Every structure is written in C-alpha cells, then in structure tokens.
C-alpha cells in the first residue's frame, strides 16, 4: 500500500498486512518528528496526487532492483507534534539484506523526488525545511 | 483559455494560494510564469531574479510531469492544463 494521509497508522497492523510465510525479514523504517532547537510541531504539505504517483514509481523501482516481496509506504501530512509519526516504510523479503537495502533505497528516493515539504514551528517562529534536492 | 496554477510551500505563501489564470491560446510555460509574477510583487520576487531569470530553486511541473526549465519557452499550454510550481522537496 502506498498512501499520503493525515491519519496516524498502527505499526503492527501495517506489518501484519504485508507479512507472508515466505518472508524471513520485515524491515521497518519509522520516521518521527524530532525535538531540535525548541521545535514544537511540523507542518507537512504535499502535492498529493503527484506524491502518491511518485511513491508508486519508487516502489516499482525497488521491486525491479531488489528480490523483495512487499512494500508499504505511508507518508503523513498536516500538523504533527514532536514525537508523532511522519513516515512508515515496511519492506518484506525472503532475506534481511535485500529488505534493508530496499528500505534505504525507498527512503532516499522519497527524500529526493516526492513533492512533500515540511515547515518547522517553534518558539523562534516558522521556517521551511530546505529540500534535499533541486532535481 | 484557463490554466490552473498550483504552488507549494514557500512559493504558495508568496503567490497567495492556487490560481486560475485566463491566458491567450498558445501561451507557453514561460508566458504563464510571467503572468503568475504579475499577480503581486511577492509572487514576482519569489519566482524571478532581479535579472528576470527564473530563480534556480523553482521546480516546474505540467500536468503532473516535471518540465526542464530549458523547455519552458517552447512548451505550449492548453485549456484546462495544470501547472505546479515548487521549491526542492523535503519529505521523509
């Protein structure tokens, strides 16, 4: 499943959704809002329809590059407080190595090309987080 | 013809939100960008350098596909098209 949503997710439910008997490893990346320099909250904005399509393309690339069995990506948008979940990636594979590699590949590609932006909100005011890539 | 313009993050704030612009038939992406810049001083400053060049960080999309800035002068828009303008992404 690939989604951009305002809702939080249930980690165990998402892992169970992709779990299969032929998978020896389910690698999970959970990104959360980090307290840094008096940060209170993060406002996430997306070009939603393009973001979903781009994440589907990234999932397809991961399937083409690595021998994996399942991919789930859930990216949250809206106002999120420190400690709240932002991003979940679950990759299921027969073996752990491919699952780790595919998970990292998906994360790096998301940061590079999915149209989502973050604004930090804290004591000192508001600030857009500079993007990783202008490509 | 009508073209929808969507802007995101700090460009959305500078332009003031989504726009629907009435443009002549055959308007190019460059022509549309100039029209967006005419909306307000903030919009113009967010999009263009003092020299009139499109700022280096502005990413262009046409109907959900990225457009290289070299194509902007020749890409012709059509009725109902959607153009998106945004700064480098920062998800994950």
Image (cartoon, coloured by chain):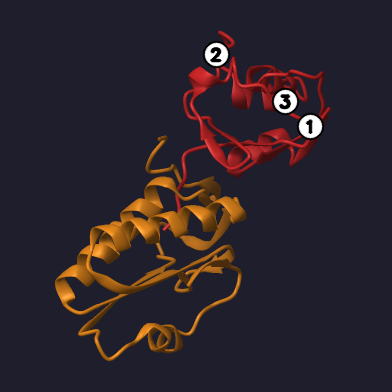
Chain colours: A orange, B red
Give the spatial CA distance, label 1 vs label 3: 17 Å
Question: Where A42 falls versus B24 (above or below)?
Answer: below
Relative image position of residue A67 (x, y in whole percent): 22, 68
Asked if residue A22 lies left or right of residue A87, the reply is left
Cβ atoms at labels 3 and 2 below 8 Å apart:
no
Q: What x and y, as percent, mark residue A112?
A: 38, 46
Q: Which residue is mark 2?
A: B53
Task: Give the structural element (helix, strand or loop) at label 1.
Answer: loop
- Residue matched to label 1: B79
Residue A64 position, x and y percent, is 29, 58
Evaluate if marks 2 and 1 touch, with contact meaning CB atoms under 8 Å apart: no
Relative depth, front residue between A106 and A117: A106
Task: Choose top left, top right, bottom left or bottom right for residue A37.
Answer: bottom left
Q: Which residue is mark 3?
A: B36
Which residue is painted at 45% across and 88% down in the image?
Answer: A13
Q: Quadrant of residue B16?
A: top right
B64 over A12 or under it: above or below: above
Answer with left or right where residue A109 lies relative to residue A67.
right
Residue A8 in view (yes/no): yes
Name which of mark 2 and mark 1 comes first in the sequence: 2
Q: Secondary structure at mark 2?
A: loop
How far apart are labels 3 and 2 at the CA level?
14 Å
Name the residue located 47 percent from the left edge and 50 percent from the top edge. A114
User: Within 10 Å of the Cα at label 3, are there few (<14), some (14-19), or many (20+) other Cα atoms?
Assistant: some
The residue nearer to you, when weighing B10 against B78, is B78
């Amino acid at each position: 499943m690939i989604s951009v949503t305002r809702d939080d997710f249930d980690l165990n439910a998402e892992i169970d959704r992709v779990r299969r008997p032929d998978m020896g490893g389910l690698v999970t990346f959970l990104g959360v809002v980090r307290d840094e320099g008096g940060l209170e909250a993060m406002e996430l904005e997306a070009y939603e329809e393009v973001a979903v399509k781009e994440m589907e393309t990234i999932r397809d690339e991961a399937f083409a590059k690595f021998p994996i069995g399942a991919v789930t990506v859930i990216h949250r948008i809206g106002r999120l407080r420190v400690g709240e979940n932002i991003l979940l990636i679950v990759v299921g594979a027969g073996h752990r190595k491919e699952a780790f590699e595919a998970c990292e590949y998906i994360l790096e590609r998301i940061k590079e090309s999915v149209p989502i932006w973050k604004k930090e909100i804290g004591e000192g005011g508001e600030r857009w987080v500079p993007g990783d890539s202008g490509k | 013809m009508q073209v929808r313009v969507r802007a995101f993050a700090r460009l959305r704030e500078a332009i003031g939100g989504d726009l629907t612009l009435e443009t002549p038939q055959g308007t190019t992406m460059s022509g549309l960008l100039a029209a967006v810049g005419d909306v307000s001083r903030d919009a113009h400053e967010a999009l263009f350098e003092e020299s009139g060049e499109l700022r280096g960080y502005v990413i262009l999309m046409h109907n959900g596909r990225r457009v290289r800035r070299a194509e902007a002068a020749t890409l012709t828009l059509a009725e109902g098209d959607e153009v998106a303008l945004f700064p480098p992404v920062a998800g994950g």
